[in-house]
Image (cartoon, helix red, strand yellow):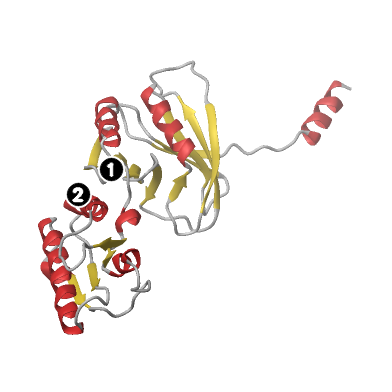
Amino acid sequence: MLRRILLTALCCAPLTVSAELRHFVASLDNSQWRITQNNPVSCQLEHNIPMYGNAVFSSQASKKLNLDFMLEMWRKPEKVTKAELVSRAPIWRPGIPDKKLTEITYQRYFNGEVPKAEAWTMLNELSKGMQPTFYYADWYNKFERVAVGLSAANFHHKYSQFQRCLSNLLPYSFNDIAFTVLNFKSNSTELTRFSKQQMDRIQEYLSYEPEVELVLVDAYTDSYGGRSANKRVSTRRADMIKKYLMESGIQQNRIVTKGHGEERHVAANDTLAARAKNRRVIIQINKNG
């Protein structure tokens, strides 16, 4: 009777397969963090994951503090993959329970990205000595799982540098200067006070990121005065802006200027305020990436 019960139990018990786990994480000895960008335009903190790729935290100059996280994989996902992000204790801190942070989706052939809030949480967990770890099923073998961890070893010093960089980011972004309209005083190459402030922002930003692809400078005048004289004035204004840009580090061959004179008005010329709008230079900046 007992034998029959045991056979029945074995027959009806669910079959479970223990998935093999491949774990990628830096050891205590080879864990390295490094600051790869450190200026008022961009901050970047990187960590190498041996045999797998890089973990990258980055933030850019902007009106609002931002943070991006990218898991750069040497071998990109072969298909859309669900992954779970867990904060776990390293092996030298036994007894601390795991904490689930979020779930993300790896898109096919793309690196893994984490939303802003969870990226901040990852940094906070690292500062506590924890290991943010991604778990997902292998793309080729459903019976294998992959774990990709960020080691907290040697983290704190570089994180302090990263935080100092964040505190010094400019309070405006590239998009805030990429298309700028500057205005001039009447019959002059002198910018208005507000436009001087705008030009100062452009110069400051580009002094930290001079490798732009192309800058277009188009200068215009109002209709007050002769047409040929206005053409010359607009050319001088465009050249003046070009000089400012070159002082910011932009190479001369990447700046294209043109003086249009009194063409393409944006307002009527029958009032002082309208003519002031027409006395303008438009700066368009393009960069790679």
Q: Nearer the viewer, residue 32 or 180?
A: 180
Q: Quadrant of residue 30?
A: top left
Q: Give the side of residue 234 with respect to residue 61, left or right.
A: left
Q: CA distance from mark 2 to mark 1?
A: 9 Å
Residue drawn at the location 32% of the way across and 42% of the way down: 171
- Please report the residue visible at 13 percent of the width from the left and 69 percent of the height from the top: 239
Does residue 153 sit above or below 39 in this rendering?
A: above
Q: Closer to the camera, 47 or 214?
A: 214
Q: Could one spot residue 15 in this view of the protein?
A: yes
Residue at screen point 39% across, 21% down? 128
Q: Secondary structure at mark 1?
A: loop
| Along the viewing direction, whichever of 128 and 16 lies nearer the viewer | 128
> Percent from the top left, x then y, of residue 160?
27, 27
Where residue 182 appears, as percent x and y from the top left, is 26, 61
**Can residue 289 be seen at all in this image of the molecule?**
no
Q: Quadrant of the C terminus?
A: bottom left
Dot label at residue 266: none
Amino acid bearing label 2: Glu
Q: Which quadrant does the N terminus fall into?
A: top right
Task: Check the image and report above or below for 247 versus 86.
Answer: below
Q: Check disc 2 and report the residue beneath it.
A: 204
Element type where label 2 sits in the image: helix
Q: Position of residue 88 (x, y in %)?
A: 47, 27
Q: Residue 11: where, in percent of width, then height?
A: 79, 35
Sequence-first tag of 2 and 1 = 1
Q: Residue at x 80, y 29 (%)?
A: 9
The residue most toward the bottom is 228
Question: Is there CB contact under 8 Å for labels 2 and 1?
Answer: yes
User: Quick one: 289 or 139, which is closer to the camera?
Assistant: 289
Which residue, given by chain and number where applicable, does mark 1 sit on? Answer: 170
